[in-house]
Image (tube, coloured by chain):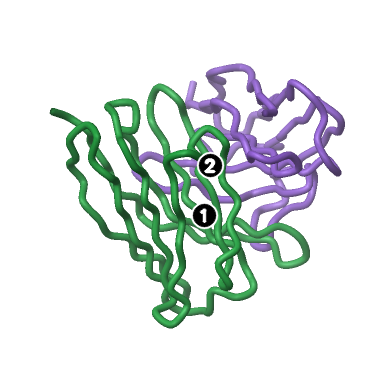
Chain colours: A purple, B green
Amino acid sequence: EVVLTQSPGTLSLSPGERATLSCRASQSFYNNYLAWFQQKPGRAPRLLIHAASSRVTGIPDRFSGSGSGTDFTLTISRLEPEDFAVYYCQQYGSSPWTFGQGTKVEIK
Amino acid sequence: QVQLLQWGAGLLKPSDTLSLTCGVNGRSLSPYWWCWIRQSPGKGLEWIGEINQIGETNYNPSFKSRVTISVDASENQFSLNLRSVTAADTALYYCASLHFGDDAGDYWGLGTLVTVSS
């Protein structure tokens, strides 16, 4: 199965700053089918990005995804207070679907 | 507004069978796939498997020998059975639909905490 490794484990930033989250895959998978989720405490994850760079309808444009092959990035251009959360990458191009272990974006 | 309402036993003993059901309100099961995902501190998020309205399934090989996902299209619900549970199966279990493509989006249940303890 495809193993996804996210870095860093924790990102300490201030509102207004730029966040760059990395997701590295152990092997490439079909069509760069990579998604990013946001999870807040006590809540289910929420889909932000699919197909590596396509934003889901309703997701603010400060969220952007990029990458291909085995290296992917989620960028939050200017952090808003509601963006502090845990972010997971997930690949759906190779069965079984797998998730990264998460990056926590916390307030500095 | 689509709602996923999930229910089932939250406390099990080792070797029991975990049984959860997820009712989908606000839309038909078709044309999406509906899945079970669990989350634990030790293993993070794990995709268990998925089913569509006509009962076609895909399972994670890590669970394949123990898991059955079924659907009752007439009741607009789907279910998870995980046999022979151990403490390692203690987790928060979500039912969900993750759909990608032109109408990408997701639906999630609130989660059911399942604890396996003797």
Q: Which chain is indicated by disc 2?
A: B
In whole angstroms, how far apart are the C-alphas of marks 2 and 1? Answer: 8 Å
Whether residue B15 is situated above or below residue A49 in the rendered picture: above
Whether residue B66 is situated above or below residue B28 in the rendered picture: above
Picture coordinates of residue B14, whole percent (x, y): 22, 31
Identify which residue is drawn at 43% across, 65% down.
Answer: B78
Of residues B65 and A96, which is closer to you in this image? B65
Picture coordinates of residue B64, whole percent (x, y): 51, 40
Picture coordinates of residue A33, whole percent (x, y): 77, 44
Q: Secondary structure at mark 1?
A: strand
Identify which residue is drawn at 66% across, 24% down.
Answer: A3
Left or right of residue B89, residue A13 in this image: right
Identify which residue is drawn at 82% across, 29% down.
Answer: A28
Do the residues bearing badges 2 and 1 touch, measured as CB atoms within 8 Å? yes
In the rendered image, which residue does mark 2 sit on?
B47
Q: Quadrant of residue B76?
A: bottom left
Mark 1 neighbour density, 10 Å: few (under 14) some (14–19) many (20 or more):
many
Residue placed furthest toward the left: B118
In the rendered image, which residue does mark 1 sit on?
B35
